[in-house]
C-alpha cells in the first residue's frame, strides 16, 4: 500500500480525560494514552478542548504539544478564546466543531454555510499561522462548497448518523458519505471522517477511496477497558488497512 493510499488513523484521547475528571486528580493520564497510541500505530492524536473543560484541559494541550512525535489535531469551537489558544500552541491541525453545553458529545456537523461571516476570519487567522484548518460537517454539498469559500483545505465528514442506523437506512447514509467524499475530491478538499466508528462500522467508511483520515476515540477507549489500548488500536488499524486494501466494504 502506497503512502498516498494509506488511510491515516487519528486517535481521540478525550475520554481518558473524562475518566480522570470523574474522580479528580491526575490519573488516568491522557498524555500516557497518547504515547501508547503512537506506539500502536496512530498517525495523529486528536484532543477537543471544550469551553467547559469537561474532559481535556489546558495543561493536557501543553503536554501534548511538548511530548507528541505525531501531529496533534486540536478540536475547538469557533470562539475567540479557542482561536487564541490554538495560535499560542500552533498544533499541526485545528478542527472546528459545533459545541453546545447541554450535549453529551458533538451532535451533528458545523453549519459552515450559515456561519460564513463568523467563521471566515477565524479560518484565516489559523491558516495564516500555518495551522491546517478542517471543518467538521455533514455530508452535504452545500456545506462542502461553503468550506471551499471559507478557505478551509480539509473537511471531516460526520459519521455519527451512519453508525447509529441499521439495514437499508445505513446503506443510504453510506452512499451519502461516498458521494460527499467524491465531491470533496472534485472541489479540491482533503476528506476526513469520524464520529462513532467502531470495529463493526469502520470497514465501509475506510474503503471510500477519497477519505484520507479517520478520527476515532470513544470506541477505542471503551475497548481498551477490556483488551488494553494498544491492542484496541492495532485491531482498528488492521480493519482499516484490510478495507483499504480491498477497496470494498469490510
Image (cartoon, helix red, strand yellow):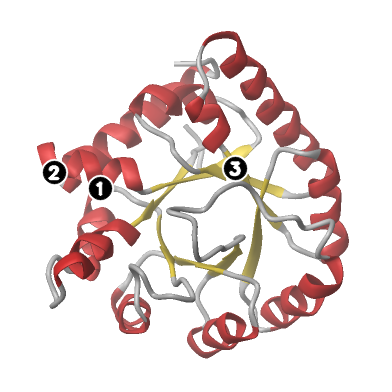
Looking at the image, is mark 2 or mark 3 earlier in the sequence? 3
How far apart marks 3 and 1 lie (CA) works out to 19 Å
Q: Residue at the location (68% across, 21% down)?
A: 175
Residue 193 makes an appearance in the image: yes
**Residue, disc 1:** 221
The one nearer the camera, 245 or 117, is 117
Q: Quadrant of residue 55?
A: bottom left
**Residue, disc 3:** 158
Looking at the image, is mark 3 or mark 1 earlier in the sequence? 3
Single out the residue that lies furthest toward the front.
102
> Which label was assigned to residue 225?
2
Q: Is residue 20 left or right of residue 148?
A: left
Residue 34 makes an appearance in the image: no
Q: Quadrant of residue 57?
A: bottom left
Where residue 27 appears, x then y in whole percent? Answer: 12, 70
Q: Residues within 10 Å of mark 2 (few under 14, many from 20)?
A: few
Against 22, is 240 above or below?
Answer: above
Quadrant into which the C terminus falls: top left
Q: Is residue 103 left or right of residue 190?
A: left
Against 190, is 89 above or below?
Answer: below
Where residue 149 appears, x then y in whole percent? Answer: 88, 60
Amino acid at each position: 500500500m502506497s503512502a498516498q493510499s494509506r488511510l491515516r488513523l487519528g486517535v481521540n484521547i478525550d475520554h481518558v480525560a473524562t475518566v480522570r475528571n470523574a474522580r479528580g486528580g491526575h490519573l488516568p493520564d491522557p498524555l500516557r494514552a497518547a504515547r501508547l497510541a503512537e506506539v500502536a500505530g496512530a498517525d495523529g492524536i486528536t484532543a477537543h478542548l471544550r469551553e467547559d473543560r469537561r474532559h481535556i484541559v489546558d495543561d493536557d494541550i501543553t503536554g501534548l504539544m511538548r511530548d507528541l512525535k505525531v501531529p496533534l489535531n486540536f478540536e475547538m469551537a469557533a470562539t475567540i478564546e479557542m482561536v487564541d489558544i490554538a495560535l499560542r500552541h500552533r498544533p499541526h491541525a485545528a478542527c472546528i466543531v459545533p459545541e453546545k453545553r447541554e450535549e453529551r458529545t458533538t451532535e451533528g456537523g458545523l453549519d459552515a454555510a450559515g456561519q460564513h461571516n463568523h467563521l471566515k476570519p477565524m479560518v484565516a487567522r489559523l491558516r495564516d499561522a500555518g495551522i491546517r484548518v478542517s471543518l467538521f460537517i455533514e455530508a452535504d454539498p452545500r456545506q462542502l462548497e461553503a468550506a471551499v469559500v471559507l478557505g478551509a483545505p480539509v473537511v471531516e465528514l460526520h459519521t455519527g448518523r451512519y453508525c447509529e442506523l441499521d439495514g437499508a437506512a445505513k446503506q443510504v447514509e453510506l452512499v451519502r458519505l461516498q458521494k460527499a467524499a467524491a465531491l470533496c475530491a472534485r472541489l479540491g478538499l482533503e476528506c476526513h471522517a469520524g464520529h462513532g466508528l467502531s470495529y463493526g462500522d469502520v470497514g465501509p467508511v475506510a474503503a471510500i477511496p477519497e477519505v484520507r483520515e479517520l478520527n476515532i476515540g470513544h470506541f477505542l477507549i471503551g475497548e481498551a477497558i477490556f483488551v488494553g489500548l494498544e491492542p484496541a488500536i492495532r485491531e482498528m488499524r488492521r480493519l482499516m488497512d484490510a478495507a483499504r486494501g480491498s477497496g470494498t466494504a469490510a
